[in-house]
């Protein structure tokens, strides 16, 4: 079972999360054709988006997306409010051969990553997208920079993925109140110490040990409390309705032309490979319904 655990530290405004993915990550990979390096990058992104989404206490979907000219031309990782994740990475067949990459993120060769929030209820919150530099140090450093610039919160990530297992560790320093502002120097020292400890965790520890044991090993000198976990699952939110929206975007004439040439018009989901097929009658119905709604 893939789980996300929250934990807090006593007497200090610092919180944490740890996520461990195996089954959901492998399910996402089954629908992609990636190199080992590309698979590891996708695994890191899925762990990262799970941590980001849970930290925002946000009812909707959170998406991380990056594009570039490297071996991976597009990277997308999404977490829906109910802790459903999905993701994709697109191989760039036109990428020039290069030397051995120093890290997974260099596979993209891009310079930006977008973090998008799509609320379930647009009346309560408008969709939002933040753009941050895609740092050469990796996805973890890029997301830390996002929280510092957009949320004004010191945040650190440790992300790892190898051999079908992905995991992430998240620490965040929360704003202090006026009553505790005199303790800020102590809080800063604790924050620095916890970050140093967090970076000592190994891939095997973070992916294979129970989350409570990971937290205990890293932070046993700092009083903490770990809460009941939330399950993370792979889940695709594609639907017939969304595939029909895609057909409307290409237009009636082109849709009919494809059917005349191919016999059917197929719309494939890039996340789960589910195929939606439409014939001439379906297309007429789709555009007739669109015309009726427009009037």
Image: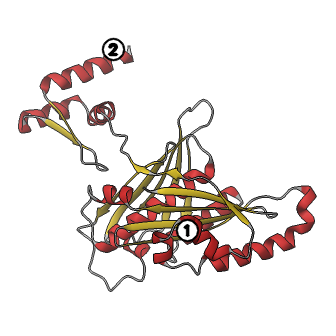
Q: Quadrant of the C terminus?
A: top left
- Quadrant of residue 109 in the image? bottom left
- Label 2 near label 1: C-beta < 8 Å? no
* Residue name at image x 57 percent, y 70 percent: 213
* Residue name at image x 7 percent, y 39 percent: 262
Q: Does residue 225 appear in this view? A: yes
- The reply, left or right, for residue 253 in relation to residue 49 is left
Label 2 secondary element: helix
Distance CA(mark 1)–CA(mark 2)? 46 Å
Q: How is the model colour-coded?
A: secondary structure
The residue lying toward the viewer, choosing from 67 and 125, is 125
Q: Is residue 88 above or below residue 111?
A: above
Q: Quadrant of the N terminus?
A: bottom left
The residue lying toward the viewer, choosing from 243 and 109, is 243
Residue 287 lies, in percent from the top left, at 26, 22
- Quadrant of residue 88 in the image? bottom left
Residue 226 lies, in percent from the top left, at 65, 59
* Residue name at image x 43 percent, y 72 percent: 105
Residue 142 numbered tag? 1
- The reply, left or right, for residue 21 in relation to residue 18 is left
- The reply, left or right, for residue 9 in relation to residue 57 is right
The residue lying toward the viewer, choosing from 261 and 49, is 49
Q: Earlier in the sequence, mark 1 or mark 2?
A: 1
Residue 120 lies, in percent from the top left, at 53, 35
According to the picture, the residue beneath numbered tag 2 turns out to be 292
- The reply, left or right, for residue 29 in relation to residue 285 is right
Neighbours of disc 2 within 10 Å: few (<14), some (14-19), many (20+): few
Residue 210 lies, in percent from the top left, at 52, 66
* Residue name at image x 27 percent, y 59 percent: 32
The residue lying toward the viewer, choosing from 9 and 157, is 9
Closest to the camera, between mark 1 and mark 2, is 1
Label 1 secondary element: helix
């Amino acid at each position: 079972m893939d789980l996300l655990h929250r934990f807090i530290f006593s007497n200090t405004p610092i919180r944490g999360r740890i996520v461990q993915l195996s089954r959901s990550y492998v399910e996402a990979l089954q629908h992609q054709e990636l190199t080992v390096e590309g698979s590891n990058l996708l695994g890191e992104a899925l762990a990262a988006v799970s941590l980001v989404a849970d930290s925002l206490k946000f009812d909707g979907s959170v998406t991380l997306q990056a594009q570039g000219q490297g071996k991976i031309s597009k990277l997308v990782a999404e977490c829906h409010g109910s802790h459903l994740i999905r993701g994709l990475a697109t191989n760039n067949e036109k990428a020039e051969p290069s030397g051995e990459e120093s890290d997974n993120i260099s596979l993209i060769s891009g310079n930006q990553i977008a973090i998008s929030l799509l609320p379930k209820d647009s009346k309560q919150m408008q969709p939002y997208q933040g753009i941050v530099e895609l740092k050469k140090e990796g996805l973890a450093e890029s997301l830390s920079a996002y929280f510092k610039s957009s949320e004004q919160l010191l945040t650190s990530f440790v992300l790892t993925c190898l051999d079908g297992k992905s995991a992430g560790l998240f620490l965040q320093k929360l704003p202090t109140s006026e009553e505790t502002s005199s303790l800020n120097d102590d809080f800063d020292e604790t924050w620095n110490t916890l970050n140093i400890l967090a970076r000592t965790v190994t891939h095997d520890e973070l992916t294979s040990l129970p989350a409570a044991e990971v937290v205990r090993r890293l932070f046993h000198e700092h009083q903490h409390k770990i809460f009941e976990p939330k399950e993370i699952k792979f889940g695709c939110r594609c639907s017939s309705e969304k595939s029909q929206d895609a057909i409307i975007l290409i237009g009636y004439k082109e849709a009919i032309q494809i059917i005349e040439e191919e016999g059917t018009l197929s719309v494939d989901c890039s996340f789960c490979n589910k195929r939606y097929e439409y014939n001439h009658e379906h297309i007429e119905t789709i555009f007739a319904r669109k015309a009726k709604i427009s009037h």
